[in-house]
Amino acid sequence: MNTSLSGNQKRKMKSASRLYAVQALFQMEHSNLTVEMVRREFLDHRFGAVYEGDEMLDGDIDLFAYVIETAVNHQAGIDQMTDRALVAKWPIARIDPTLRALFRAAGAEFRDDSTPPRVVINEYVDVARAFFPDGKEPKFVNAVLDHMAREARPEAF
């Protein structure tokens, strides 16, 4: 039996992990749960769970853990970078909490050079589309993340 994953399956798992990371960061901001408590809850109850007949995708556990831990451990710096990227000059505290979680997750990935910034941007724009299918948020997310990526990883542009 071949248990190796195709490139497409690995990409889907990474995409699922990013969505889960945004949900986890949102949940942590609205509760007093620690990173470890939220990580355990997501691994035990969300990754691969079945909701209303739909099986949730398994996520890339390492990527999920990296994103939430880095977002929490470097939150001040990531939030400052996000503030600089918010062209409307809205402080991060005033934006939608889902977007705040998304910017923190993406900011965490910009700290690591294993994924090209453009891939990170595209992935989180897709996450924004999942949360805001009919709104202007995906375009806003694209603009803010592009600014953040150019600050965090200028050599990639």
Image (cartoon, helix red, strand yellow):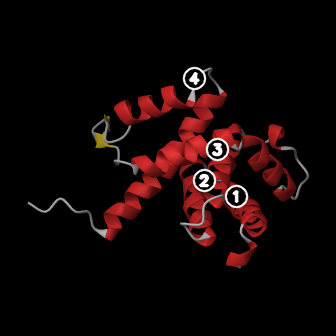
Between marks 2 and 4, how big is the CA–CA gap? 24 Å
**Residue corresponding to mark 4:** 33
Give the image location of residue 15, x and y in percent: 46, 57
Given the current orientation, which residue lies at the most extreme right position?
Answer: 89
Which amino acid does the dot numbered 2 rest on? Ala
Q: Tell me if mark 3 has few (under 14), some (14-19) or many (20+) residues whose alpha carbon lies within 10 angstroms of its own.
A: many
Q: Is residue 112 left or right of residue 153?
A: left
Given the current orientation, which residue lies at the most extreme top position?
Answer: 32
Say above or below: 77 vs 124: above
Between marks 1 and 2, how big is the CA–CA gap? 7 Å
Q: Earlier in the sequence, mark 3 or mark 1?
A: 3
Q: Residue 141: which disc? A: 1
Q: Is residue 19 left or right of residue 73?
A: left
Q: Residue at x 75, y 61 (%)?
A: 148
**Residue corresponding to mark 2:** 128
In-front residue for pair 19/72:
72
Between marks 3 and 2, how big is the CA–CA gap? 17 Å
Q: Tell me if mark 2 has few (under 14), some (14-19) or many (20+) residues whose alpha carbon lies within 10 angstroms of its own.
A: many
Element under label 3?
helix
Say above or below: 157 vs 87: below
Q: Earlier in the sequence, mark 3 or mark 2?
A: 3
Q: Earlier in the sequence, mark 1 or mark 2?
A: 2
Element under label 1?
helix
Q: Which image quarter is the N terminus in?
A: bottom left
Between marks 3 and 1, how big is the CA–CA gap? 17 Å
Q: Residue at x 62, y 22 (%)?
A: 31
* Tally of numbered tags: 4
Between marks 1 and 4, how big is the CA–CA gap? 27 Å
Which amino acid does the dot numbered 3 rest on? Ala
**Residue corresponding to mark 3:** 71
